Image (cartoon, helix red, strand yellow):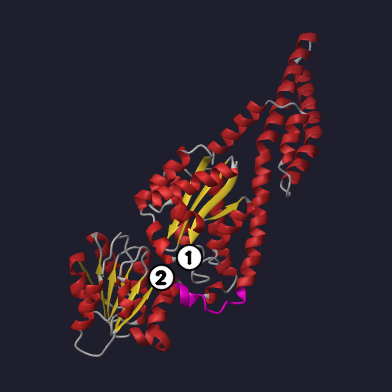
């Protein structure tokens, strides 16, 4: 079996395609279930964020795997395969590992170095584990990605290469004033109560806004976010929750609005933005930030007088001109080092069932020969028999020790996958026995 990833992101597809291809939670579940039902895939995990959709799988056939995963992405995203295919990228084996580790470190993000992707990778792994679609390979891979991402942030200054998408978006609205001077004393409306919206609310609270109004389709989640914002010892910001039906009314009273929901249609229409801008009694601008994919706020907001608007598309354009930190090179070196380590570990693990089967066969041979000795020398007492048994086992263990240690070392090197086959052939190991050991090993993962 081999690792394969098929996906699209802000680097390969325009925002218009990414918007239409976004996968809500129920579609992600169905995609994973259908991926496992497809013949080429034995494991599957999906990483779906506002600017990427990637399907990871353990496949036994490359071309069949690419075709099947591409078709499944098209089916569940609702974008036709002919339209989707030009925007898809494919990574296989070490390149697939390299890709996910780069993503985890923020090297492939719209804003280099952003750390939110680690939470999204963690969520993708949790979903695969809950649905039992992530087995040994994908569990190992995604856990490695989380570890490497944390290592990159702790050992380098990759955080300085860029900010989180939320912070970057707010900085684009604030301009030269900076977030803290720009936000102080303003009234903010936050639509949504998920991770992005919560991060936006917390950032605005720290920046000194006077009030935050939270709107969410699930009232309990909005109430919970308000409770967090008003915790003792916090920022002291005033916060309250409202129903989604009140969003347009609250927009007219707000100075800043950030929206990031899972809605499939517009949350704020062009008419709503026009009405909010017209309702303002002074010359102060209305600042809008849309972090949703598909978009929450009508793109016509770019052309409304008195409104400063940033969305995923404009943030992508702005981040393309952002300076790269010198630490990026160090993170790339970490990724390369970790890809090699992951490959070596996987290759070494691949030969373990064969080594276990070989030792089991040797143990059977020892047991058989001791039984035959008993029939030939029935007069042996228990002490003599035990000493002979220990001696034979020591001889067998010493003979097998050096070759099994060496074969594990060789198997961990590039091109070492053939050593397991050679071992099975040389010792005439039963393939079914090796497979049984491998299945038992996976069951313990």
Q: Which residues are magenta?
A: 316-327
- In the image, what residue occupies the spot 55% across and 42% down? 64
Where 423 falls versus 318 (above or below)?
A: above
Q: Which residue is mark 2?
A: 312
Q: Which residue is mark 1?
A: 10
Instruction: Classify 10 Å Cα crowding around label 1: few (below 14), some (14-19), many (20 and above).
Output: many
Q: Looking at the image, which is closer to me, 9 or 147?
A: 9
Give the position of the N terminus as an image quadrant: top right
Q: Are marks 2 and 1 in contact (CB under 8 Å)?
A: yes
Residue 329: image location, x then y, percent: 64, 71
Q: Earlier in the sequence, mark 2 or mark 1?
A: 1
- Residue 65, relative to residue 166: is it above or below? above
Please give left or right for residue 87 compared with residue 327 in the image. Answer: left
Q: Nearer the viewer, residue 98 or 359?
A: 98
Q: Quadrant of residue 341?
A: bottom right
Tag 1, which secondary structure? loop
């Amino acid at each position: 079996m081999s690792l394969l990833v098929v996906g699209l992101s802000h680097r390969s597809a325009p925002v218009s395609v990414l918007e239409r291809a976004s996968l809500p939670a129920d579609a992600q579940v169905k995609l994973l279930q259908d991926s496992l039902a497809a013949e080429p895939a034995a494991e599957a995990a999906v990483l779906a964020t506002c600017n990427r959709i990637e399907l990871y799988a353990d496949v036994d056939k490359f071309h069949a795997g690419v075709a099947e995963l591409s078709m499944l992405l098209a089916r569940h995203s609702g974008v036709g395969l002919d339209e989707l295919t030009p925007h898809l990228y494919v990574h296989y084996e070490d390149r697939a590992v390299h890709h996910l580790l780069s993503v985890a470190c923020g090297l492939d993000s719209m804003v280099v170095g952003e750390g939110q992707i680690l939470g999204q990778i963690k969520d993708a792994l949790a979903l695969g584990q809950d649905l039992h679609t992530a087995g040994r390979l994908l569990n190992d891979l995604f856990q490695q990605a989380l570890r490497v991402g944390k290592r990159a942030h702790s050992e380098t200054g990759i955080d300085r290469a860029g900010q989180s998408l939320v912070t970057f978006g707010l900085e684009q609205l604030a301009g030269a004033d900076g977030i803290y001077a720009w936000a102080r004393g303003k009234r903010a409306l936050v639509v949504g109560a998920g991770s992005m919206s919560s991060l936006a609310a917390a950032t605005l609270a720290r920046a000194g806004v006077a009030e935050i109004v939270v709107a969410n389709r699930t009232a309990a989640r909005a109430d919970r976010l308000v409770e967090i914002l008003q915790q003792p010892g916090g920022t002291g910001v005033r916060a309250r929750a409202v129903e989604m039906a009140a969003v347009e009314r609250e927009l007219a009273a707000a100075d800043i609005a950030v929206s990031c929901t899972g809605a499939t249609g517009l949350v704020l229409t062009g008419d709503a933005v026009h009405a909010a801008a017209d309702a303002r009694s002074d010359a102060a601008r209305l600042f809008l930030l849309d972090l949703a994919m598909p978009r929450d706020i009508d793109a016509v907001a770019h052309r409304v007088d008195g409104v400063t608007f940033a969305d995923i598309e404009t943030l992508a354009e702005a981040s393309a001109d952002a300076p790269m930190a010198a630490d990026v090179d160090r993170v790339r070196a970490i990724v390369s080092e970790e890809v090699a380590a992951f490959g070596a570990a996987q290759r070494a693990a691949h030969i373990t069932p064969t080594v276990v089967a070989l030792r089991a066969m040797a143990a059977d041979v020892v047991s058989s020969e001791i039984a035959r000795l008993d029939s030939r020398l029935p007069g042996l007492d228990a002490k003599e028999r035990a000493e002979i048994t220990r001696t034979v086992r020591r001889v067998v263990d010493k003979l097998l020790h050096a070759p099994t240690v060496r074969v594990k070392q060789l198997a961990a090197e590039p091109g070492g996958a053939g050593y397991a086959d050679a071992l099975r052939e040389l010792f005439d190991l039963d393939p079914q026995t090796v497979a049984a050991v491998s299945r038992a090993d996976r069951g313990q993962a």
